[in-house]
Image (cartoon, rainbow, N blue to C red):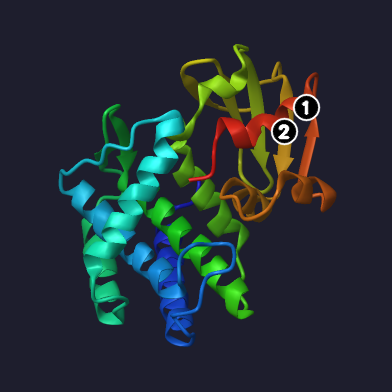
Amino acid sequence: MTVPWTELRNDLEAAVFRFDTLIGDVDRNRQVDGSDWSIEEAACHVMTAFDRWSAMSEGSTVDVGHGREFTPRMSEINEREIEAIGRGWDAEAFGASVTRWIERCRDPNSAMLPYGPPELECSHAHSSAILLGELVIHGYDIARTVDAPWPITRREAIAIFEGALVLLPLVYDGSATEGRTFTMDVRLRGRSGGLGLHCTPSPLTINNGSPPNAAVHISADPVGWILIGYGRRSQLWGAYTGRVRVWGRKPWLALRFGRLFPSP
């Protein structure tokens, strides 16, 4: 993580407060725009995400497969967890779920194996960034639905991006390469250093640093990038607004990003 743990933890706790405040001020029976969930279901999902990660940090694992299996399996898990709550949204229970997770993060660098098979190692700091993404993205959905402000900072976006990197090998769909092998250079503005995504028909390799021989180079505003990555905005929106800029020998490969990494 390039975002220091103290800053990430502060952002996580601030996002929890913002999310709890937002949920307390809206009609939770209202449908979230562009979603099959009500606001209450979306809020319950965020709470169950904290519970799931706490359980995984204590040794349980979740089998989500990889590639094309990941998104439908994750959807099934989400629906099952929401139904299991039964009682619906409970602010006190949400606070307890968050506290349980924070207590698990006394050593943010300690490793866990949350998913398997295939096994995937993840630090508590990266897991916290993933949970920050749950709060920020679903808070964004709900705020848009009720026309409420929901600012996202560059630092939050960079942390969410770095947390999501851990999941990329699971989400990655090698069939979208159409049998080709190529490297993408992804640079988030304000983040120190780019990343090389070496895409092949089977595994994905992620390397620190911008590879000079990449087939396509992508420079992106962090907030715009996570909204695109989570399927809240389109790639065309990113290009039209200047939030994403693409160049290189094969710039059209950038359009394949959404197929290589389907939104979770």
> Is 100 located above or below residue 149 in the figure?
above
Q: Position of residue 157 (x, y in %)?
A: 57, 55
Q: Amino acid at mark 1?
A: Trp
Residue located at (15% from left, 43% from top): 59
Residue lying farthest to the front in this orientation: 36
Residue 151's disc number: none
Residue drawn at (45%, 29%) of the image: 67
Closest to the observer, 43 or 209 = 43
Q: Report helix, strand or loop for mark 1.
A: helix
Residue 155 seen in the figure: yes
Measured Cα–Cα span from mark 1 to mark 2: 6 Å
In x, y percent, where is residue 11?
A: 46, 65
Amino acid on which the number 2 mark rests in the picture = Leu
Asked whether residue 105 is in view, the answer is no
Q: Are marks 1 and 2 in contact (CB under 8 Å)?
A: yes
Q: How far across and how far down the image is residue 153, in percent? A: 60, 63
Q: Is residue 123 left or right of residue 171?
A: left
Placement of the N terminus among the 4 image quadrants: top left
Res 185 → quadrant: top right
Using residue 141 as the reference point, say whether residue 246 is left or right of it.
Answer: right
Residue at 39% from the left image edge and 56% from the top image edge = 131
Residue 255 marker: 2
Relative to 66, residue 114 above or below: below
Packing grade of label 2 (10 A; few <14, some 14-19, many >=20) is few
Q: Residue lying furthest left in this view?
A: 59
How many circles with numbers are drawn on the protein?
2
Q: Which residue is mark 1?
A: 252
Q: Secondary structure at mark 2?
A: helix
Reply above or below: 97 against 223.
below
The x and y percentages for residue 177 are 61, 19
